Amino acid sequence: MDKHEIILKLKDSHRLFIDYLTSLDDRAFMYSFQDEKWTAGQQADHIYRSLMPVHLILKFPKWTIKQLLGTANRPSKSYDELVAKYYNKLENRTGTPPKFFTPKEITVAIKPIIFAKVQNNLNKICNSLEGFTEEELDELILPQPLLGKVTLREMMYFTIFHVQHHQKITERNLLNFI
């Protein structure tokens, strides 16, 4: 995917996620499968928490990102290769994700606020991406908690996949909703 396709897919996948969660009635929005799975609101908070560090790092000048995090020593993986790597890492994961990414309880009252936060961070990421070249997407690296060091292009692939992944989890958990 080139940069413009990435931006379109980022916007589309997050819009579909928010539209889906918006369509849920209050009871479904607050439902937690087996009282241990995240509610739909918590899924949205997790997505917000996942977007925030990406948005923040992209605010830095490119030379700062290079200085702090380095540059890639390999070509970017394709979207499909990155997703396969994620599932492999997820399957073999030990421990828990960093606490920062664990969502808070999200009530129906703050549903529009969390959706606005997701959208705001996504817009900032997409706007920032406009300032990067195709080469820079493959040169700059960012840390991803499960995948390790990934190129900026791979982080965007992950961001597209990640929101779709959590929408599917929410849909699957709501299959049990009565």
Image (cartoon, helix red, strand yellow):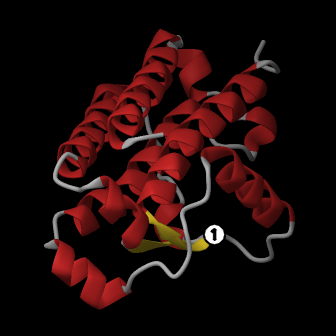
In the rendered image of this protein, does residue 127 appear above or below residue 169?
below
Q: Tell me the kind of residue under disc 1.
A: Leu
Crowd rating for badge 1 (residues with CA inside 10 Å; few <14, some 14–19, many 20+): some
Residue in view at x 30 percent, y 41 percent = 122
Residue at horizontal 27 percent and vertical 68 percent from the top = 57
* Residue 145 percent across, percent down from the top left: 57, 72
Nearest the eye: 42 or 83: 83
Front-lying residue, 46 or 123: 123
1 vs 139, left or right, is right
Q: Is residue 164 toward the left or the right of residue 3 in the image?
A: right
Decide: is 126 above or below 116.
below
Q: Residue at x 54, y 60 (%)?
A: 102
Q: How many numbered circles are shown?
A: 1
In the image shown, does 174 or 139 lie closer to the viewer? 139
Image location (x, y in percent) of residue 148: 59, 76
In the rendered image, which quarter is residue 22 located in? Answer: top left
- On screen, residue 145 versus residue 106, left or right, reads right
Quarter of the image with the C terminus in it: top right
At horizontal 37% and vertical 86% (from top left) the residue drawn is 70
Identify residue for label 1: 147
Quarter residue 172 falls in = top right
Tell me residue 9's x, y (percent).
Answer: 44, 30
Instruction: Quadrant for residue 169, please give it.
Output: top right
Q: Secondary structure at mark 1?
A: loop
Give above or below for 115 relative to 156. Answer: above
x, y percent for residue 134: 33, 53
Q: Quick one: which residue is furthest to the bottom in this view?
A: 67
